[in-house]
Image (cartoon, rainbow, N blue to C red):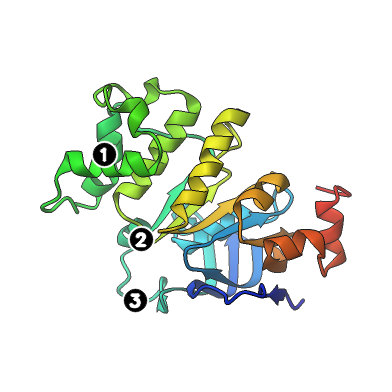
Amino acid sequence: MAVSMVRPSAEPAPIKMSVRGLEAWFGKHQVLKGIDVDLHERQVTAIIGPSGCGKSTFIRCLNRMHELVPGATSKGKVTLDDVDVYGPGVDPVLLRRRVGMVFQKPNPFPSMSIKENVLAGLKLTRRMGGLRPMEVVERALRQAALWDEVKDMLDKPGTSLSGGQQQRLCIARTLAVEPQVILMDEPCSALDPIATARIEDLLHSLKADYTIVIVTHNLQQATRVSDWTGFFLTGELVEYAATDRLFTSPRDRRTEDYITGKFG
């Protein structure tokens, strides 16, 4: 089925990532079916849809994390700045530095301090070079709106923080490696409303420098934080449009039924 890809009246931002004909499987079970979508630079794209529709698999294909699952395969084309991320010579580890991931459940490394957690990605990719560790830590924690809360306890375990603080620490860990794209897989689902609001406020500030793709079950959250929204259903991208248009005048009946609560 053709996907409605309506642009807002304003001049659209440049395309940062482009996906064409993306299909994915777990063993013989196909979970993505011919996804075509453009992700715009320094804007937030929300991915919505019922459980099991392929949302998380989609974003994991963007930085090749899908292939880490035994038996998982994919085909199609995904480009970052016009470079095929599945092309020969592309190092998946370095790709994941450029296209970072924040997971559903906060996952600071339990044996590491707050400071060590922030630096973990840089050390993993051996990219510290001439960087000054404390400058990296402060920059990343400030970007994640966490510095003022933890600056006097950097040597304490990352797991000593509250759930919302742990998630912002994980965001800081992602930011420390200076990615270009940030993928977020339901980053607020395990958080209380106050912590969720902090993350949403953070998204508004981060999009000044980063392209962000967020998977969310919370339709209100999608309307609050995103510029674009894609609605997935049974492995298909049913509709993709500017968020305000998709939620006020969806062009596919299935989209309307989902956002009005008739299923999902």
The percent coordinates of residue 104 (x first, y second) are 54, 40
Q: Residue at x 42, y 79 (%)?
A: 82
C-alpha separation, residue under disc 3 versus residue under disc 1: 36 Å
Say if 188 sits above or below 214 in the image: above
Q: Which residue is mark 3?
A: 88
Describe the element under mark 2 as helix, strand or loop.
helix
- In front: label 3 or label 2: 2
Q: Quadrant of the N terminus?
A: bottom right
C-alpha separation, residue under disc 3 versus residue under disc 2: 17 Å
The percent coordinates of residue 110 (x first, y second) are 35, 27
Q: Which mark is residue 98?
A: 2
Which residue type carries mark 2?
A: Arg
Q: Earlier in the sequence, mark 2 or mark 1?
A: 2
Say if 29 sits above or below 149 in the image: below
Circle 1 Cα neighbour tier, 10 Å, few/some/many (<14 / 14–19 / ≥20): some
The percent coordinates of residue 87 (x first, y second) are 38, 76
Q: Residue at x 62, y 30 (%)?
A: 193
Which residue type carries mark 1?
A: Glu
Q: Nearer the viewer, residue 11 or 93?
A: 11
- In front: label 2 or label 1: 1
Q: Which residue is mark 1?
A: 138
- In front: label 3 or label 1: 1
Describe the element under mark 3 as helix, strand or loop.
loop
C-alpha separation, residue under disc 2 versus residue under disc 1: 20 Å
Q: Earlier in the sequence, mark 3 or mark 2?
A: 3
The percent coordinates of residue 237 (x first, y second) are 70, 66
Describe the element under mark 1 as helix, strand or loop.
helix
